[in-house]
């Protein structure tokens, strides 16, 4: 009898170890338990403390100027629909430009924009107009407070996408359109086109604006989605179910990349004639990934969290440092490509949080060899020569 019990005990132990090794251990590792943060590309950096809590950076390639969607760390943490933070409506967010060659920060003034429920920034894209390269379209997610004073904790934010127009050296953003549609439910990030009328966007929690199990569902299943809108034709979901979608980026050749935070991966899609998306590749990385951007050389950069627990602390108290990584993904042209390793995933940048803390957005300018990192609650913009 004792022998049988021992056997059963050993069996249970073996199963437990197996579960640990196959499921729990990789999950803990992905979220950074036991991970050692190694500095990469952070030895020649400076910071711009004037620019705080910028959730998204877009580089204007021809001039090297950055567009940033910013807030203040204090305000930001009170209103982030993506993580159910609805403390108070912090609707005084703004967009600024930053010129690294002169160090000049220019907050852009909204024009022709009457929103009684303000502007709460999140994802952004800035694209030259197809008709006139000096003109830019700025696509912005706006998490407005709900209509009629409804409680956002119960109904979520009333999120829309705003389209603005500007010129390369202008200090104002002229409003063009507000796009509101039932499929724009929990928008996070977007990529816009030069017609000033169309864009793809991610819904980080699909149609789940609120609800107790929303975050759990988002981590364990595919409730997120990707949608497409055209201001004259309406909106539709082009990828109705995808795991924990977050950042989205596009290449000039109709390739669209969507990052998964909980899935630590990138899904690669090809845009079709009818604007639908066809999945062509799936790239696994080893850290939770956030916002994506493509540099002028075709390398895809993702903001990664090497330590998820530090990131959680940073979101409660922005002065708590959270390590940052720039995940660089390129087409593999080396020997591994023979064995089907189509993509090369590298650490393009890593910092323990001293210079770049809680980074959620990275942009790299290969022409001028500048890497820019910022975070939704971070205290400054970090610029590193690499
Ligand atoms: C599209 O462009 C990206 C970025 O330059 C490149 O990696 C990818 O291979 C291209 N895709 C196709 C189908 O040509
Ligand atoms: C566009 C954008 O900023 N997307 C995400 C960037 O990272 C933060 C942190 O996880 C997310 O909350 C944003 O949704």
Image (tube, rainbow, N blue to C red):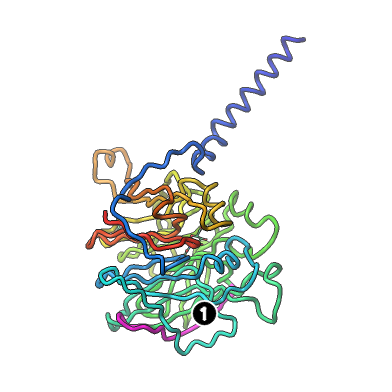
The N terminus, quarter of image: top right
Rendering quadrant holding ligand 1: bottom left
Residue 296 x/y as whole percent: 27, 62
Residue 331 visible within the image: yes
Q: Residue at x 46, y 74 (%)?
A: 140
Q: Residue at x 43, y 72 (%)?
A: 199
In the image, is residue 349 above or below residue 122? above
**Residue under label 1:** 179
Q: Nearer the viewer, residue 95 or 122?
A: 95
Position of 320 with respect to 199 (left or right) is right
Residue farthest right in this picture: 1
Which quarter of the picture shows residue 298?
bottom left
Mark 1: few, some, or many residues within 10 Å (few <14, many ≥20)?
Answer: some
In the image, is residue 24 above or below residue 250? above
Q: Nearer the viewer, residue 91 or 44?
A: 44
Residue 274 visible within the image: no
Which quarter of the picture shows residue 335?
top left
Magenta residues (range): 166-182
């Amino acid at each position: 009898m004792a022998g049988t019990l021992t056997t059963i005990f050993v069996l249970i132990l073996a199963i437990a170890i197996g579960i640990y090794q196959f499921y729990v251990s990789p999950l803990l590792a992905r979220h950074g338990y036991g991970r050692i943060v190694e500095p990469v590309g952070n030895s020649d950096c400076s910071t711009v403390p004037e620019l705080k809590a910028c959730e998204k950076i877009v580089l204007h390639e021809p001039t090297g100027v950055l567009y940033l969607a910013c807030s203040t760390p204090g305000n930001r943490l009170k209103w982030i629909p993506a993580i159910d933070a609805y403390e108070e409506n912090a609707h005084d967010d703004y967009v600024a430009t930053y010129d690294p060659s002169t160090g000049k920060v220019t907050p852009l003034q909204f024009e022709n924009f009457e929103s009684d429920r303000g502007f709460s920034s999140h994802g952004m894209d800035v694209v030259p107009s197809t008709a006139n390269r000096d003109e830019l379209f700025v696509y912005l997610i706006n998490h407005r407070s709900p209509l009629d004073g409804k409680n956002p904790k119960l109904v979520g934010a009333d999120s829309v996408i705003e389209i603005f127009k500007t010129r390369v050296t202008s200090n104002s953003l002229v409003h063009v359109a507000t796009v509101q549609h039932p499929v724009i439910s929990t928008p996070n990030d977007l990529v816009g086109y030069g017609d000033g009328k169309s864009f793809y966007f991610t819904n980080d929690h699909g149609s789940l604006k609120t609800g107790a199990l929303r975050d759990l569902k988002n981590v364990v299943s595919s409730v997120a989605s990707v949608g497409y809108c055209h201001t004259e034709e309406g909106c539709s979901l082009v990828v109705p179910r995808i795991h924990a979608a977050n950042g989205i980026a596009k290449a000039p050749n109709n390739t669209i990349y969507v990052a998964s935070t909980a899935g630590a991966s990138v899904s690669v899609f090809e845009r079709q004639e009818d604007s639908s998306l066809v999945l062509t590749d799936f790239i696994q990385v080893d850290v939770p990934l956030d916002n994506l951007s493509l540099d002028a050389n075709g390398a895809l950069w993702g903001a990664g969290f090497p330590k998820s627990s530090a990131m959680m602390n940073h979101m409660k108290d922005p002065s708590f440092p959270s390590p940052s990584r720039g995940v660089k993904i390129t087409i593999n042209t080396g020997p591994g490509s023979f064995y089907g390793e189509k993509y090369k995933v590298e650490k393009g940048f890593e910092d323990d949080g001293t210079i770049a803390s809680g980074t959620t957005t990275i942009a790299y300018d290969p022409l001028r060899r500048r890497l820019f990192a910022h975070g939704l609650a971070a205290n400054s913009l970090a610029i590193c020569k690499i």
